[in-house]
Amino acid sequence: MVCAPYHAEMALRRITLHVDDGDLLLIKEAAVRLGVPEAEVIREGIHRIAEAHRHRDGSFVSGDETFDLGGPAR
């Protein structure tokens, strides 16, 4: 989990969150286990979910970068 501090490369903005007690307990436990502040666990979680739902326009590769494997996959 917590690979890099996301705040090291970008400006942070203070926000207020409403968190379920069970989720807060999980965040606290993860922070202790990882040896990082709770805020870092929350930032990473926000970053991961935002990336997972990010809309990307177009293809990852161009037509010139693709190739035919000779038929449908089995």
Image (cartoon, helix red, strand yellow):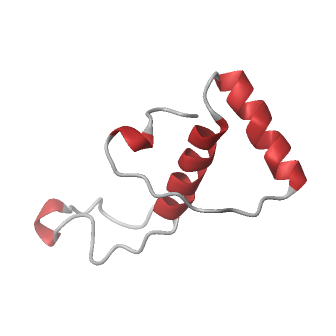
Quarter of the picture containing the N terminus is top right
Residue 55 occupies quadrant: bottom left
8 relative to 48 in the view: left or right: left
| x and y percentages locating residue 31 in the rendered image | 69, 31
Q: Residue at x 21, y 61 (%)?
A: 67
Q: Residue at x 69, y 62 (%)?
A: 17
* 15 or 53: nearer the viewer: 15
Q: Residue at x 78, y 59 (%)?
A: 19
Q: Is residue 54 above or below residue 43?
A: below
* 37 or 50: nearer the viewer: 37
* 2 or 68: nearer the viewer: 2
Q: Is residue 7 above or below residue 49?
A: above
* 50 or 15: nearer the viewer: 15
| x and y percentages locating residue 57 in the rendered image | 30, 78
7 relative to 34 in the view: left or right: left
Residue 46 occupies quadrant: bottom right
Q: Residue furthest right?
A: 22
Q: Residue furthest bottom?
A: 57
39 relative to 25 in the view: left or right: left
Query: How many callouts does the rendering have?
Result: 0
| x and y percentages locating residue 40 in the rendered image | 57, 39
Q: Is residue 45 above or below residue 50?
A: above
